[in-house]
């Protein structure tokens, strides 16, 4: 049902896919940006069904999945993390990659919808600890397209890796242009 609704929204609003999703890679962190609006969730869900992308999840706090609507968040593709655990979020998510033959997690490099002065590093360290690549995906509201960009393999040169990541996202306009990443590039 969610797939049908989001696919219809996609079509009615004229969104397109630019690039090809690397379906041959079973495990990856999908870094999605710029994250400037709650509409990013709708675009992401729709892109997941239109592409299609299998075994792709997003993170949510454990409490969302314990309550009456836990089934709903799981149906959307959510996977829980326990923020009160002594094991940090990076390790919890990296462990999830070990549990499955196919596991893809979508995360925002900014970690918020507000303008940031630098990217968060959790998505990067999850990929590094799990030994999986990072697919860069842009939500270009100006041109109504989801851009499947390059794959980044975390290296021993974190500064160079982040330079490549910000260079990809900087020219892409999110729903709220002022909250984007242009100033980081």
Image (cartoon, rainbow, N blue to C red):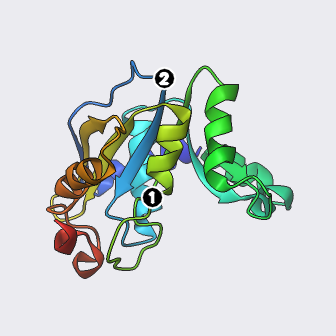
In this orientation, which residue lies closer to the viewer: 31 or 126?
A: 126
- Identify the secondary structure beneath mark 2: loop
Mark 2 closeness class: few <14, some 14–19, many ≥20 residues within 10 Å: some
x and y, in percent, of residue 72 in the image:
72, 53
Position of residue 57 measured from the top left corner of the image (x, y, whole percent)? 57, 43
Q: How many marks?
A: 2
Location of residue 154 (image quadrant): top left
The residue that disc 2 covers is 26
Asked if one can make out residue 9 in the rendered structure from this viewpoint, the answer is: no
Say if 137 sits above or below 63 in the image: above
Q: Quick check: 9 left or right of 73?
A: left
Name the foreground residue: 93 vs 112.
Answer: 93
The nearer-to-camera label among 1 and 2 is: 1
Residue 81 in the image: x percent, y percent? Answer: 71, 53
Q: Quadrant of the N terminus?
A: top right
- Residue in the image at 49% along x and 48% along y: 125
Q: On the image, numbered disc 1 is attached to which residue? A: 121
Q: Can residue 58 be seen by looking at this rendering? A: yes
* Foreground pick, 184 / 77: 184
Q: CA distance from mark 1 to mark 2?
A: 22 Å
**Between 93 and 158, the one nearer to me in the picture:** 158
Q: Residue furthest front?
A: 156
Establish if 144 lies above or below 181.
Answer: above
> Helix, strand or loop at disc 1?
loop
Among the two numbered marks 1 and 2 on one chain, the one whose residue lies closer to the N terminus: 2
Measured as percent of width and height from the top left, residue 63 is found at 80, 63
| Mark linked to residue 11 | none
């Amino acid at each position: 049902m969610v797939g049908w609704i989001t696919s219809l929204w996609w079509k009615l609003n004229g969104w397109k896919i630019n690039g090809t999703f690397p379906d041959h890679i079973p495990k990856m962190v999908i870094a999605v940006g710029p994250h400037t609006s709650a509409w990013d969730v709708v675009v992401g869900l729709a892109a997941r069904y239109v592409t299609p992308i299998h075994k792709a999840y997003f993170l949510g706090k454990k409490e969302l999945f314990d309550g009456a609507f836990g089934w709903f968040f799981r149906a959307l593709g959510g996977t829980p993390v326990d923020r009160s655990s002594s094991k940090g979020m990076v390790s919890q998510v990296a462990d999830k990659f070990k549990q499955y033959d196919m596991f893809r997690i979508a995360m925002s490099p900014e970690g918020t919808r507000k303008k940031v002065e630098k990217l968060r590093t959790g998505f990067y360290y999850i990929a590094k600890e799990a030994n999986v690549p990072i697919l860069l995906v842009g939500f270009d509201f100006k041109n109504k397209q989801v851009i499947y960009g390059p794959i980044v393999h975390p290296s021993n040169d974190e500064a160079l890796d982040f330079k490549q990541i910000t260079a990809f996202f900087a020219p892409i306009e999110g729903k709220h242009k002022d909250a984007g990443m242009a100033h980081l590039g």
